[in-house]
């Protein structure tokens, strides 16, 4: 990812983190906060993105539906990842 994409990833994490529905899910907010902190500390953004995508996939296995605020973040992670399946790691809420 370029610096622009790194900034976009941070903004997508921040937007999802600050969503009211996401805030009701402490395990999800913990994942997002950890990823944001890793980006801020200078960790490789491809690695952070890949690990966050994987973490969201596992989170989705334990939750039937995910907040709509995760959709843009999930799409960004998929678009900027190498070798990931093009599938949301959770089912969107209706």
Image: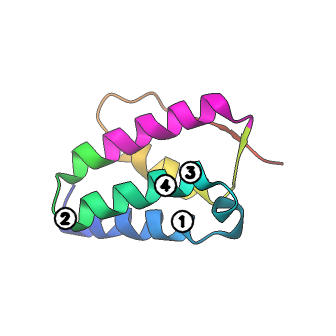
Relative to 11, 43 lies left or right: left
Give me the C-alpha separation between circle 4 and circle 3: 5 Å
Looking at this view, is 63 or 69 the one in front?
Answer: 63
The span shown in magenta is 49-64
Mark 2 and mark 1 lie on one chain; the one further toward the N terminus is: 1
Disc with the residue nearer the chain's start (3 vs 2): 3
- Specify the label residue 62 is tagged with: none
**Where's the N terminus, which quadrant?**
bottom left
Q: Is residue 43 left or right of residue 50?
A: left
Res. 41 image quadrant: bottom left
Observer-nearest residue: 84 or 54? 54
Q: Secondary structure at mark 1?
A: helix
Residue holding disc 4: 30
Q: Secondary structure at mark 4?
A: helix
Element class at badge 3 = helix
Q: Residues within 10 Å of mark 2 (few under 14, many from 20)?
A: few
For marks 1 and 4, the one nearer the N-term is: 1
The answer to whether residue 88 shows anywhere in this view is no
Question: Which residue does the numbered mark 2 point to in the structure image?
Answer: 41
Q: Is residue 56 magenta?
A: yes
Residue 20: x and y, percent? 70, 69
Q: Tag 2, which secondary structure?
A: loop
> Disc 3 marks which residue?
28
Mark 2 and mark 1: Cα distance apart in space: 18 Å
In the picture of the structure, the residue carrying the numbered disc 1 is 17
Q: Position of residue 82 (x, y in %)?
A: 29, 34
Density class for disc 1 (Cα within 10 Å; few <14, some 14-19, many ≥20) is many
């Amino acid at each position: 990812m370029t610096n622009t994409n790194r900034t976009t990833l941070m903004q997508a994490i921040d937007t999802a983190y600050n969503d009211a529905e996401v805030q009701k899910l402490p395990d999800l907010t913990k994942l997002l906060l950890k990823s944001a902190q890793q980006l801020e500390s200078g960790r490789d953004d491809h690695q952070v993105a890949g690990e966050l995508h994987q973490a969201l996939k596992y989170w989705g296995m334990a939750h039937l539906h995910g907040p709509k605020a995760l959709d843009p973040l999930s799409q960004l992670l998929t678009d900027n990842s190498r070798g990931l399946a093009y599938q949301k790691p959770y089912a969107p809420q209706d």
